[in-house]
Image: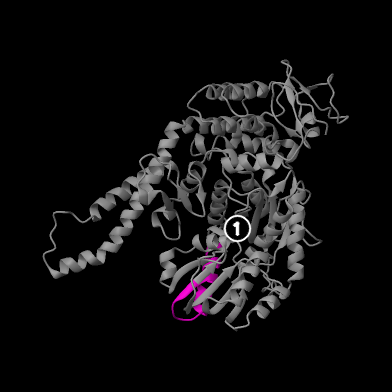
Amino acid sequence: MNVTLAVKQYISKMIESSGPGMKVLLMDKETTSIVSVVYTQSEILQKEVYLFERIDSQSRDSMKHLKVICFLRPTKENVQHLIQELRRPKYSVYFIYFSNVISKSEIKVLAEADEQEVVAEVQEFYGDFIAVNPHLFSLNLQGVARGRSWEPSMLSRCTQGLTSVLLALKKCPMIRYQLSSDMSKRLAESVKQIITKEYELFDFRKTEVPPLLLILDRSDDAITPLLNQWTYQAMVHELLGLNNNRIDLSRVPGISKDLKEVVLSAENDEFYANNLYLNFGEIGTNIKNLMEDFQKKRPKGQEKLESISDMKAFVDNYPQFKKMSGTVSKHVTVVGELSRLVSERKLMEVSEVEQELACQNDHSNAQQVVRRLLQNPRISELDAVRLVMLYALRYERHSSSILPSLMEDLNRRGVSERHRTLCWTYGGKRIRGSDLITPTDAVSITKQFFKGLKGVENVYTQHQPLLHDTLDQLIKGRLKDSQFPYLGASSLRDRPQDIMVFIIGGATYEEALTVYNLNRNTPGVRIVLGGSTIQNTKRCQTATLSTHSSFPQVCLLPTGNGAFYTNVCVFCNAPCVCSLYPLTFDVLTALERYRVVGFPAAAKYKHY
């Protein structure tokens, strides 16, 4: 199962079907991203596609001597654009490909608009997702939730994207979902509805063991997106931001013009492909080796081209040298900027504390190191908030919690009330289904204890995502039906072989590494991971803020003895000036329907 290969094959087939000759590729905003992550412009140019246009562009010229390949999402807007295009065609012949299922009524409307009979072909090619890595895909969707429910348009888009992946991989799966998440159940039902409705499309050759689709909710593992990463791809996304394989380096001090935006693609960059999952120390060594190799192959200025054969050898080697030169300068710049940020933001120290908060259970030490880092002016606001969020997740029920005091530390640092809110509203036992922090049975406790003693490379890689344990249990046939039920009456009797996992709220590159390692180390099992987006700390915080911004305000005021005053009584839904509430998550559970906004100077009374 390879999502990158699936999309590449679709695009190749589109181009080949249009026949020889010069062509235009006409796309929308989303399909432009879908194509750009699997093909470089130079690769497509070799296939006689010489022009790339957007269907919503108003400045396209008429080119009647060219054929056009239209690759579009089947949205109402795109259908309308196509109708206008076909009424006044700018190209000689149209080959139209939709990235997902399109209704017969819309096909009929397009046929009626094609009065000049310029359409040669209309097909559905199911590439309605971003193929990030061979085993990782994204839908590039932010803000899929409203509170703990679906944003209506996002449920439809996630259903379309997920069914597109199933069709591209030619799988008609059994479906399991996370019972604690109503969003997971609704998506599972929505996907099943499409499979039932379009049963002819999903009529693939039956396998001995049916494939399995597992739908999870990001809220079940709130820790993983918050941690600093130390493998190349994950580190780049966390510190610089990867958007459709592109990095914006325009803010890097002293950056040259041609490196203000660079592309990192494992399909077209051998160094990146080989170092994708290596840690930062190994990358530094490999960069040094790359530089030395480049120095050996670089043409020396004093060498003279004295013969025809010398000139021929130089011309033959120059494109390869030019490509290598670009690769070296790109990766030296990226790794150099990562190194600068690690030093400037003291990320080694921050990451060590993050790992201790995520994996260890030493409250006395945790409160000391978190407070010490919060008082360090070199720690960025993002990292300060991240540390308090992790502390809140780990010690949400600890009797000696110093969370109010840490919130005051954030306030003194000048952290906005909006960002302090995150420490209350993000994650927490009250909104997740699994026991992420504290195992309850003796076997789990023993396993967690020994996990800290062996099999850990260093203090920066102690953490394993919850997804690792979930998939491990699934592969061994031990994943509890009571927590991850099947949709429908059927269930798998044998060990699953083809597993597709989708995380509502976004997957992470740390989880992608987990899937990569499971694929390598578990013969006979093939896993593909997807998410509504690819998360990092910034995206996670932004999504949490937008999710909770629609709730009424509730002000919690510290009283100084571990208790809190709230301006809205959680029992009578009215201002209640005499109520004091201790810091327990029973109270915060009752406050879930509100937007909790930290510690304002004075209570702003708002009736719910």
Report which quarter residue 82 is drawn in. bottom right
Taking the magenta stretch, the answer to whether it contains residue 9 is: yes
Above or below, 174 against 148 in this view is: below
Q: Would residue 561 be seen by someone viewing this image from the given angle?
A: yes
Left or right of 102? Residue 280 is left
**Residue 170 seen in this snapshot:** no
Q: Residue at x 67, y 35 (%)?
A: 437
User: Is 216 left, or right, of 380 in this rendering?
Assistant: right
Is 72 one of the magenta-colored residues?
no
Residue in front for this viewpoint, 131 or 91? 91
User: Tell me, what colour scheme is on the image?
Assistant: one colour
Residue 382, position in %: x, y?
55, 34
Type of the residue with mark 1: Ile
Q: Where, quadrant-wise, is the N terminus in this rendering?
A: bottom right
Residue 120, given in percent of the width and then of the height, sits at 57, 82
Q: Residue furthest left?
A: 306
Q: Is residue 516 above or below residue 57?
A: above
SS at circle 1: strand
Please give the range of residues in magenta: 2-24
Question: Where's residue 40, x and y in %?
Answer: 44, 63
Most frequent secondary structure within the magenta stretch: helix
Q: Is residue 541 above or below residue 489?
A: above
Measuring from the top left, give residue 434's x and y in whole percent: 72, 42
319 up-or-down from 252: above or below:
below
Q: Given the current orientation, which residue lies at the most extreme right position?
A: 572
Which residue corresponds to mark 1? 527
